[in-house]
Amino acid sequence: MAYFNVRGASARLGNISMEYSTLGAVDLGSNSFHLAIARVVEDQIYPLDSLRETVRLATGLAADKNLDERAQERALAALKVFSERLAGMPRQAVRVVGTNALRVAKNSGPFLRRAQQVLGFPIEVISGREEARLIYLGVAHSLPLANYNRLVVDIGGGSTEFIVGHKLRTKAMESLYMGCVSYTDRFFGEGRIDKKGFRQAELAAREQVQTIAARYEKEGWKEAVGSSGMARSIAEVLQKGGRGNGTINAPGLEWLREELLKAGEVKKLALPGLRDDRAPVVAGGVAIMCGIFDELELGEMRVATGALRDGVLWDLLGRVHHRDIREVTVEQFARRYHVDSVQAERVRTLANKLKAGIAGENASPTASDEFLDWAARLHEIGISIAQGAYHKHSAYILANADMPGFSRQEQGWLSNLVLAQRGKLAKMGAAFNDDGHLAPLAFCLRLAVIFYRSRRTLQLPKLAVRSEGHGWRLKVPADWLERNSLVAVALAREQQEWKSVGFDFEVASD
């Protein structure tokens, strides 16, 4: 059993930081899956290897928003190829992100479990705005820094991201539900390309862009930049057709539209520069690009080599070598919601010491330590809404707010931890069953909240805690419990709460 004194504040855990010479990023897009391997030299990333598999995950989304089996099998086959390249790489040196198709699919959970088993690494489904942030990070690092705003547009298979940024900082981010795969399926069925379908697709794209146009125009930009495969394909076709110099321009788009309409069918397309694997979805991509140019009144757009996977690499570099953007987000949320920093620090300190106690003296730091640390610092953000049931408000904010750097799953972990800090544990039964790491973290957070319920800096006694069987044992001096009857009563209730969800919790005193 680990004994410890709780007096004053301990140093913040910070990031679980290690140095890696090689990093890997996997982008599970709605059209293509990409893998990028890079070498790290000091503060720079140098590409080593890349793989691309055309999966068209979005075409497998049925009317009921479930991924069909054929699409899943295509995806698993691609991941099998990727797994061979990633074999032997440390888990912390690889980040895998899923985008729109996996955000939308109702059966993404069961599929992701299969996918993670094949790939050998965890998969994070990221929000649209987090995708936009990472895209901008990749694009910004692929271009010379300029002292003006840039508009970055990324047409993916199921969504299109819009970002206005200055140097490495984003100023506006949005993800719209329109992509080259989804629009091709919707407006160009069975490979037909006609004026009616093209017009409808352009209008639908303009209608989407109209929702953000005023806000983006207010931010302003001097240069428009396209990223990812669709923008590069359009630019290459225009250049091969003598309609551009490697950029996308309005007259060139008009010409390309007419060329697509002349062909009438995807199978009849014969455009120099258009790859065979891009041809089936080019009509949807060009229609979206035309709608964007018209609605935002663009004249020209340069094309960047950086994309989502590059942004994931740069973000991963920040996590393992420098400063995690998630740490910045936690600090910003604490300020935004006016968290009582003194109380948060009390709870954080004790929760971390309890976690260290049940982990054992020789345990190495883990990623779960970070989540307990973050949850403790943010556990009271819901008080800014109302004191009553504040833990529920806190959990709702953490589950639904845009939190740069956090995946949906990670926000779910934080939300569940904060929800579990007080009240009945029956509500956490399913969450505890789904994630075996959650219950011990919730145990530490709940006890820390109980001990510091008075919101005063107490002279806590020498505590001893350890894991025991399917639960935990806490040793507290009897004389201290006699002087602090509210804590004693709360600990007695706590034993019953943990018993209700299948865990043993013993409080011993001497």
Image: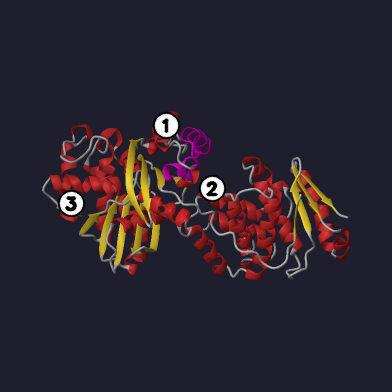
Q: Nearer the viewer, residue 132 or 214?
A: 132
Q: Residue furthest left?
A: 242
Q: Dot 3 lies on which element?
A: loop
Quarter residue 487 falls in: bottom right
The residue where tag 1 is placed is: 80
- Is label 1 or label 2 in front? 1
Quarter residue 170 falls in: bottom left
Q: Quadrant of the C terminus?
A: bottom right
Amino acid at the residue labelled 3:
Gly
Residue 476 at what x, y percent from top left?
82, 57
Which mark, by number, is residue 409? 2
The residue where tag 3 is placed is: 246
Residue 484 in the figure: left or right of residue 53 = right
Q: Dot 1 lies on which element?
A: helix
The local crowd at label 3, few if under 14, some if 14 to 19, many if 20 or more residues have their Cα within 10 Å, is some
Q: Residue at x 35, y 52 (%)?
A: 45
Q: Dot 2 lies on which element?
A: helix
Q: Residue at x 47, y 55 (%)?
A: 319
Q: CA distance from mark 1 to mark 2?
A: 23 Å
Q: CA distance from mark 3 to mark 1?
A: 35 Å
Quarter residue 240 falls in: top left
Part of the protein shown in magenta: 96-124
Q: CA distance from mark 2 to mark 3?
A: 39 Å
Q: Nearer the viewer, residue 40 or 274?
A: 40
Q: Residue at x 37, y 65 (%)?
A: 215
Amino acid at the residue labelled 2:
Gln
* First reached walking from the N terminus: tag 2 or tag 3: 3
Residue 387 at what x, y percent from top left?
68, 66
Residue 222 at what x, y percent from top left?
26, 66
Residue 123 in the figure: left or right of residue 85 = right
Please say whether residue 313 is one of the residues in the magenta stretch: no
Amino acid at the residue labelled 1:
Lys
